[in-house]
Amino acid sequence: MTGPSWPLVPVPPPPALPPETVRERLAASQVWDALGFTPADAEELARWRAAVSAADIRRIAAASAKVLALPGQRLGPAAKSFFDGLPDRPGQPPGLLPMIALGVCAPEVVEFGRAQGFATETAGSGLRDLGQQARVHRLATGSFGLFTQWWLTLAWGGSLWWFGRLQFNLMRYEGEYWLSVHIPQTGPLAGVRDSFDRAREFAARHLGEFAIAGFHLDSWLLDPNLAAGLGPESNIATFAGRWELQPAPREASDDALFFTFGDRAATDYAALPRRTRLERVVAERLEGGGAWHSPTGLIRWGAPAAVRAPR
């Protein structure tokens, strides 16, 4: 099946940022305030931004050429080696230089979205995942840093949008375009209907040329054993019941461990905490010799979503 490719209107990438611009944006609080950092992470990042050396500014400026080439060129994240040119340096938090390289290039990503006709808030919504990923790093390690910089190339490609509780990106699956759903760790899985409605309105208004088939999700939260353990009244079970599961789910016990306990490498399952019903269900299945799997779920759209007048 053939069809349009991203972006709707190709945008030539701008040149690398000069070091002077990097230095100016490091000090521009409005750039960083829009990236979703928690107060604790924002405060620590501000200290590191003020301490970036001239040599690291030159490295970040050189790396910005690759980052600025992302908007409009990708429907998925780049390889994990994307930021190999900005390795961790002794005494710095992990992922600091990639984090800063992404941040100083954020204005161009917003401008790319605006050129596609998106509202500024929507065009920049996916960039808040930078702060969210730093928050997940702190939850997992207890310290400031980033270890998912490769994943954030999806948001900096300009095709990740955050509507309410859920994130969405345009993707191809089985020869069709879909809006793939992501579930950030921001609290209970509630308010998803509003997120779905807003995403469909956005797609109807801005992505009609792609003939999007529906919503797509690859997540261990769709493992039927989870809904069975939590009970039909749980938010997760209600959410999982929306999806048509596809065959051959991938093994995802490490996902279940990480997103429940912040640890992908735990092997002493008997020692896992059981403070919540979710922790208890995940730990007991692993301790009993079971595994967790990540099915692909689909929600195929019927009639096109109505497009409301701009507010």
Image: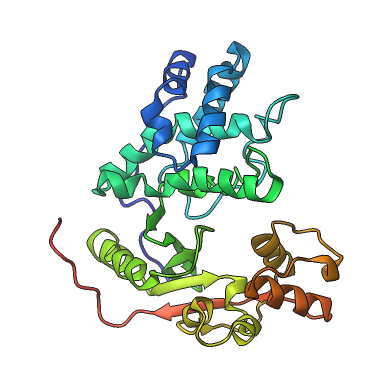
- Point 51% across, 28% down: residue: 64
User: Which quadrant of the view contains residue 250?
Assistant: bottom right
Is there any visible trace of residue 5 in the rendered image? no
Q: Position of residue 174 (x, y in %)?
A: 51, 74
Is there any visible trace of residue 102 in the rendered image? yes
Q: Position of residue 22 (x, y in %)?
A: 47, 20
In this picture, residue 8 sits left or right of residue 237: left
In this picture, residue 177 sits left or right of residue 285: left
User: Is the N terminus in the top left, top right, bottom left or bottom right quadrant?
Assistant: bottom left
Report the front residue among 45 and 218.
Answer: 45
Report the front residue among 123 and 193.
Answer: 193
Report the front residue among 107 and 174.
Answer: 107
Q: Residue furthest left?
A: 309
Q: Position of residue 206 (x, y in %)?
A: 26, 58
User: Is the C terminus in the top left, top right, bottom left or bottom right quadrant?
Assistant: bottom left
Q: Position of residue 189 (x, y in %)?
A: 48, 69
